[in-house]
Amino acid sequence: MLKDFLRKVSLFVDLDDAQLDRLAAVTKEEHHPAYQLIFREGDGVDAFYLVREGMVTVFRDLQGKPQQVLARLEEGGFFGEMGLLNDKARRYASARTAAPTVLLRIEKPDLVQILAANPGLELKFRAEVIRRHGMNVSALLGLAGQRDVRIRLGVDSVMEMEDGARLSVTLENLSLGGVGLSGVPITWQTGQAVHFRLGLAGEPGILDVRGTVTWREGDTIGIAFAPEAAGDALLVQKALRRFLDARR
């Protein structure tokens, strides 16, 4: 029954049976009375929660300001995702039950291991934080004190330029914020705006890359996505799956 419940949670719908079994094995059920504080803003981040039954209110209560309710979560809702990938992160808000509630708790170390084995799931978590807090990637990472997760790939790829020219490169990493490539033209320098299609040899382009070169070391560069593409989890997930398939 626990596995069936987890399968219905939007974050976990793409996990296979073996991955769901692993998730269920580290999930603990907790019973809480109404109006019990689960954690307080500023506490260390030690776990991720799902609401199995009941209701949870997530709020901020700053001194001298009215209480700000961020969310009311019922069955299938989840909270506590902010800071899961940063050892120094603190709770961004407080959470309290609004009725007798059954929670599913997953300890941070257990969930981090599962995310490390499922890059697509980790991207979903990042995207959910961005969506819930209404921030762009740079603002989010600054608030959380963490860097954008980069999925290391090392996949032979092809860049198709706007003039139709094609260049063989290596896709080193991919994230919600941008890409890392090696084998790029020597003329590409930090601060330069670039636009090209990235794909695999003999196939149509997979990812439309539009952004700015933010660093360069030898023939390897990092490109930050333009604001309209940064944080687009669906875009990155689709590309990630195709590039991961090519690496196998």
Image (cartoon, rainbow, N blue to C red):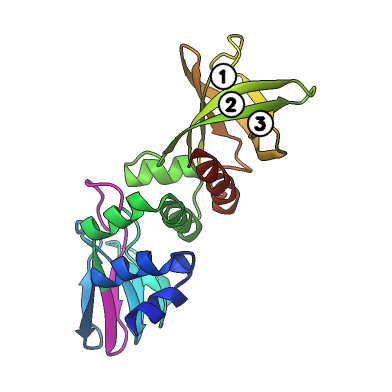
Task: Determine the secondary structure under disc 1.
Answer: loop
Residue drawn at point x = 23 percent, y = 59 percent? 110
List x then y, in percent, for residue 191.
56, 19
Tag 2: residue type?
Answer: Thr
Which residue carries the number 2 mark? 212
Who comes first in sequence, dot 1 or dot 3?
Answer: 1
Give the numbered dot on residue 191: 1
Which residue carries the number 3 mark? 201
Q: In this view, does 231 lie to the left or right of 58?
A: right
Instruction: From the image, give the main secondary structure of the stretch colored magenta.
Output: loop
List x then y, in percent, for residue 168.
62, 22
List x then y, in percent, for residue 85.
31, 49
Tag 3: residue type?
Answer: Ala
Residue drawn at point x = 27 percent, y = 62 percent? 63
| First to last magenta residue range | 84-104
Q: In this view, does 29 lie to the left or right of 222?
A: left
Q: In this view, does 53 lie to the left or right of 188?
A: left
